[in-house]
Image: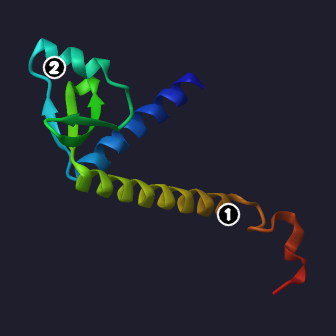
Amino acid sequence: MILVALAIGCSTTKSTESLLSAAGFKMVPASTPAQEAHLKSLKPNQVTMAQRDGQIYYTYPDVPHNVLYVGKEPQYQEYQKLRLQKQMSDEQLNAAELNNSAPWGAWGGWGGFGWR
């Protein structure tokens, strides 16, 4: 059970990183001890808004790869759109898998009550 949770967590993180890259977020490696410490201080597995020099940025820490994903508002909006599309696609896939796994189709043993 713990291994399944870890596998799901890792696949979710990898999926998030793929979506961020597809949305145009830039990967900025942590190249100094101060940057590494800052990277580790950020909330894991979460896109966070930050302000720097009057600009708003969205960041996502990838501590295992020692990288910070950074984007602005257009990249964040694209990420949100891609994330929603993926969620909807995953839900459709799950529904199709459940429907196909039912022993007698979607109605199971009820036979559909003769409705057409």
Quick one: SS at disc 1? helix
Whole-percent x and y of residue 99? Answer: 67, 63
Residue occupied by mark 2: 35
For the C terminus, the image quarter is bottom right
Classify mark 2: helix, strand or loop.
Answer: helix
Q: Tag 2: Cα neighbours inside 10 Å, few (<14), some, or many (≥20)?
A: some
Which image quadrant: the N terminus? top right
Q: Earlier in the sequence, mark 2 or mark 1?
A: 2
Could you tell me which residue is drawn at 29 percent across and 50 percent down? 76
Which residue is located at x 89 percent, y 83 percent?
114
Image vertical order of residue 108 relative to residue 47, above or below: below
Question: How far apart in space, not on screen, are marks 2 and 1 (Cα)?
Answer: 49 Å
Q: Residue furthest front?
A: 54
Relative to 12, is 90 above or below?
Answer: below
Q: What's the residue type where badge 2 is placed?
A: Gln
Disc number placed over residue 99 in the picture, else none? 1
Q: Is residue 87 left or right of residue 17?
A: right
Up/down of 79 relative to 62, above or below: below
Where is 54 relative to 100, above or below? above
**Could you tell me which residue is drawn at 24 percent across and 22 percent down?**
39
